[in-house]
Amino acid sequence: MAVRIQEADFDTGAELDRLTQGNKRIGGLAVFVGLVREMHVREGLHRDRIDALTLEHYPGMTEKALEDIEAEANRRWPLEATLIVHRYGRLEAGDRIVLVAVGSPHREAAFEACEFLVDWLKTKAPFWKLEETPAGEKWVGAHEGDDAAAARWEKNRQ
Amino acid sequence: MKVRYFAWMKRTVGIADEEVAPPADVKTVGDLVVWLRGRSTGHAEALAEGAAFGAAVDQRTATFDVPIGGAREVAFFPPFTGG
């Protein structure tokens, strides 16, 4: 189990190699990599392109929140390895934001736990996105779909 | 006790954090919100009734009925948008 919050980029391949190294009980590794996608937002009559965003977080609380989420995944599924790496600071379109990797003897647990971790970290970890558009900076509002995605794990306990 | 503000709330209040010593009748997160509103127009706007924000007490998410007696740090922030 490991959680890291960092400004620097991560090497996905190297992270996954390190995570599984020496553990021969892992039969499946499910991985999610979140990227900054190029987006267009409508502001009145204008369409603005988002060139970059800045991720702010709450040092101290972020680590605790992610460790809680990771511990919950380990309670619900038989996991051999979990890793969450989340970046903060200024990121441009195409940059990696987050890596979630889950190793388990079987693929079902790995897939489910990986999806659970991504859904929960979006709604329970203290990160905020500030988007840069040609018209200026704009704080991103919470997405209702994210709450719904996180909520289904509240009911549907494995 | 240290009070911290994040994202747009930090800009609206005008500061990232402050040391405060609320009176004894400020017992919960909700009491603190009401009391902080009186500190400036920025506070009043950021912590306005109906504004969408959450709180943490000593770096754990907390609802407004959570007591703050003995707390070292209380934080206020908009809904999370990470991942």
Image: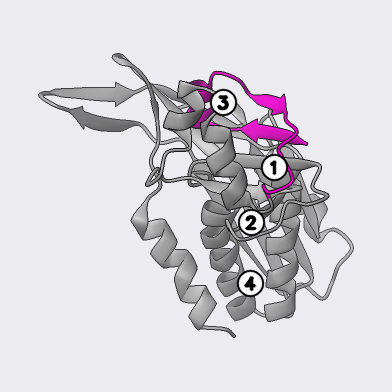
The residue that mark 3 highlights is B39
Chain label for disc 1: B
Whole-percent x, y for residue B15 in the image: 60, 20
Kindly report the distance in space between the C-alpha atoms of the residues bearing marks 2 and 1. Answer: 9 Å
Chain label for disc 3: B
Q: Quadrant of residue A108?
A: bottom right
Whole-percent x, y for residue B83 in the image: 53, 47
Chain label for disc 2: B
Q: Which numbered disc flags the more N-terminal residue, 2 or 3?
A: 3
Q: Quadrant of residue A19?
A: bottom right
The residue that mark 2 highlights is B62
Q: Examine the rendered structure and indicate whether residue A61 appears above or below residue A157.
A: above
Same chain, labels 2 and 3: yes
The residue that mark 4 highlights is A110
Chain label for disc 4: A
Is-magenta flag for residue A21? no
Along the horizontal axis of the image, is A147 left or right of B21? left
Q: Amino acid at mark 2?
A: Ala
Q: Amino acid at mark 3?
A: Arg
Kindly report the distance in space between the C-alpha atoms of the residues bearing marks 2 and 4. Answer: 31 Å
Q: Which numbered disc flags the more N-terminal residue, 3 or 1?
A: 3
The residue that mark 1 highlights is B74
Magenta stretch bounds: B1-26
Whether pointer 3 and pointer 1 mark residues with C-beta atoms closer than 8 Å, the reply is no
User: Can residue A4 be spotted in the picture?
Assistant: yes
Q: Nearer the viewer, residue B7 or A93?
A: B7
